Amino acid sequence: MPIVAAMDLGYSNAKLAWLHSSGAPLEDLYLGIRHSRSDDPDKRAASALKTRLFPAGAAPIDALADSRSEEMPGHIVKVNGEDWRAPVDFKDIQGNYRDFSSEYVKRDVWLALLKGCLAEIGEPEIETLVLGLPSNEYYNSPDLEKTIIGRAKGKHELDGLTVNVKEVLVVPQPLGTFYGQLLSSDKERAEFLLESLVLVIDPGFYSCDVVLINEGKRIYQDSSVSTPNSVKAICDQLRAHLKETHQIPIPEGRLESQLRQGKYTVAGAKGLHNFKDDLKVIAKDVATSALDGIRSQLHSSGHEPNIAILTGGGADLFEPHVKEGTKVAAVYKTDDPVMMNVIGFLRAAC
């Protein structure tokens, strides 16, 4: 049974979706989405669509605490002859194995994550693998697309398994969100989206990516932008605020882990401190700055979208400010903001 897979190997999350296709992949995808969201656990278990969400940590095993433990998540993979474990939580990594540059897809950590996700699927052959790039990198750095295809396509030797990836597609990340929203909508809303000028806003960890899509076909590159005003900016400002105002230092990886789990309490010299209100204030400032830039770009290009689709790990933090910040008539936040884009990536393979 052919398998199509999609990955979003980001700076904070590694997102994975794959589909066992019966030969009619688009119909299988529609059915898989419905079954995966069913209240019936048997239908969810039997769904042809499988998804996974991991912290996007990866490191040589010697840089991990208790790295050989059977209880540690992730998979041991070979990268340039060295044993790495991926994906793992950043808080379990000793040392700095993160890269926030545009060279990220060329690094060992990216390849380790790719192999770890292939090991998670656990199948010897992938018919088509779809991966994403931030909008600005997709349109302005075509060599990165070639790099991704070159590193992902072909045979990968894993622990006890050889995986052959036959075809690799690369798409701008917010396009996956549009496809995902389309797949998840009822017929009336899907038709409306396909007739509209839609602004897709994807505040991920490192950047807030934006694309403007006309009638589900044309992407206006003059309005496709990326801004660093996103979740990392919120985290950096929050860490600085906690340290300066409350004398509470907190490592970057630890704060990310807490936010991922919805935990907002940290310990300081004066006792426990709940930083949820601090987070809201900082998120408003960062979101407003990002949305000001988006509105300015739209104004200069002369486009006036009537719908915004909001997705990504920062969707909840941005949501209260998007309608006012973009002046659109309606804002749709995706049902699963974190995973929606990678599920939508599969549409490109169908």
Image (cartoon, rainbow, N blue to C red):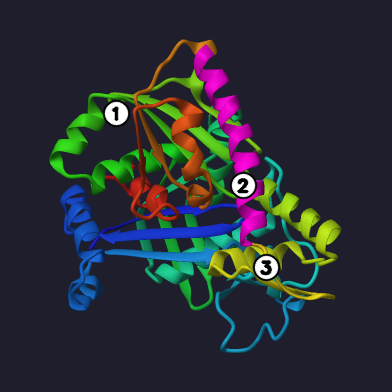
Using the image, tell me which numbered label, if any, was put on residue 90.
3
Identify the image quadrant of residue 168.
Answer: top left
Which residue occupies the foreground of this view, 181 or 305?
Answer: 305
Q: Amino acid at mark 3?
A: Phe
What residue is shown with label 2?
283
Identify the image quadrant of residue 269.
Answer: bottom right
Relative to 145, residue 241 above or below: below
SS assignment at label 3? helix
Using the image, tell me which numbered label, if any, was put on residue 293.
none
Which mark is in front, 2 or 3?
2
SS assignment at label 2? helix
Q: What is the spatial separation of the Cα atoms under label 2 and label 1, in whole angstroms? A: 30 Å
x%, y% of residue 92? Answer: 69, 75
Segment tinted magenta in the rendering = 276-299
Residue at x-position 66% and y-position 59%: 109
10 Å crowding of disc 2: few (<14), some (14-19), many (20+): many
* Earlier sequence position, callout 2 versus callout 3: 3
* Earlier sequence position, callout 2 versus callout 1: 1
Q: Amino acid at mark 2?
A: Ala
Which residue occupies the foreground of this view, 301 or 58?
Answer: 301
* Earlier sequence position, callout 3 versus callout 1: 3
x%, y% of residue 144? Answer: 59, 37
What residue is shown with label 1?
216
